[in-house]
Amino acid sequence: MQRQRRNRGLEYGVILLIMELFNIGITNIPPVTFISIVGQLALYAGFLDVPWDKWDVCLNARDIIRNKEYRRLFLSAVEHGDDMHLYYNMLSFIIKGRSLERRMGSKNFLLTLAVLTVLTSCYYVGLGWALTHLTNDVYYSKVCAVGFSGVIFALKVMTSEQQDTSMRYAVWSELILIYLLVPGSSFMGHLAGILAGLTFSRTRIGKFLKKIIEGVTGDRYDGNNYYQSQQQQQNHEFNAQANFFNNPFGGFGYRRAPPAYGYRNPQNVPYGWNF
């Protein structure tokens, strides 16, 4: 199949994101957070020439388990469905990235992002496989998702660990609200992110992964001891959520859900399954 060049350029959401970056101040955004945002922006806008289309690498259980297309575990997270999907995901990522990267250090944060991305994708695949067998409906193994929102939910769990007990349950409320209010949002993707965040924050597996990260970077995981004030963090969260609910396009998750029989790409050329 001939790959179609993106060349989306500066769409409305891309322009809003660039303005937001300058409004916050580039020097006020830690380096890994900033580079991650710019990289995903450049990928979406077509400034980076890559040998795949976003729906070639969207995440689903069937292509991971049956076809062993493991690149989808990572690449699906950095692709986005449309410009507003990119904008709202990156707006939320700025909030969490500034807090967490300054607290744990840039090298640790970079490896943490990589681990959470793969872990979230693995949970998504596991949920799809389990639901397919429980319901006897292949829809759950074929539903295809892109976007960074699962990782953002994992980061939200980590951020809430530094706040009071009530805030730790807010992420579950947000999961339900987004599913009910935002058409096209990926409930499985967001749930997978929460499970990844809990695994990383509260289990022995997470402690083991943190020790590995510390061994690789040579830095103590929470060595920077940087914390935003609770009021400042809540203000950031409130502003992000207000922007989210004013978004007519839906923001934090984006999925493409094929019907049970599958369907094809715009060129009517099948790849993976008939998509």
Image (spheres, rainbow, N blue to C red):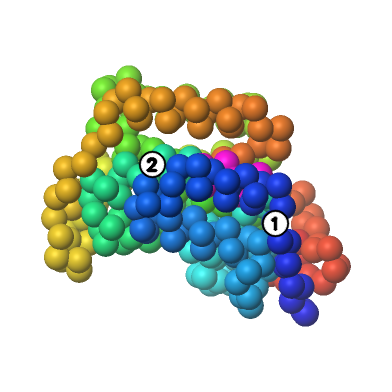
Q: Position of residue 99 (x, y in %)?
A: 32, 41
Which amino acid lies under the numbered mark 2 shown in the image of this protein? Answer: Lys
Circle on res. 10: 1
Circle on res. 52: none
Q: Position of residue 165 (x, y in %)?
A: 27, 22
From the viewer's side, name the closer residue of 264 and 246.
246
In this picture, is 234 found above or below 199?
Answer: above
Mark 1 residue element: loop
In this picture, is 227 found above or below 255?
Answer: above
From the viewer's side, name the closer residue of 106 and 171.
106
From the viewer's side, name the closer residue of 251 and 193.
251
Q: CA distance from mark 1 to mark 2?
A: 25 Å
Question: Taking 45 as reference, is 202 left or right?
Answer: left
Q: On the image, which quarter does residue 89 sit in? A: top right
Neighbours of disc 1 within 10 Å: few (<14), some (14-19), many (20+): some
The magenta segment is 84-91
Question: Taking 36 as reference, is 104 left or right?
Answer: left
Q: Position of residue 256 (x, y in %)?
A: 70, 50
Say whether residue 12 is magenta. Answer: no
Q: Is residue 68 visible?
A: yes
Residue sitting at 20 percent across and 68 percent down? Answer: 216
Circle on res. 96: 2
For the stretch drawn in magenta, the main secondary structure is helix
Which amino acid lies under the numbered mark 1 shown in the image of this protein? Answer: Leu
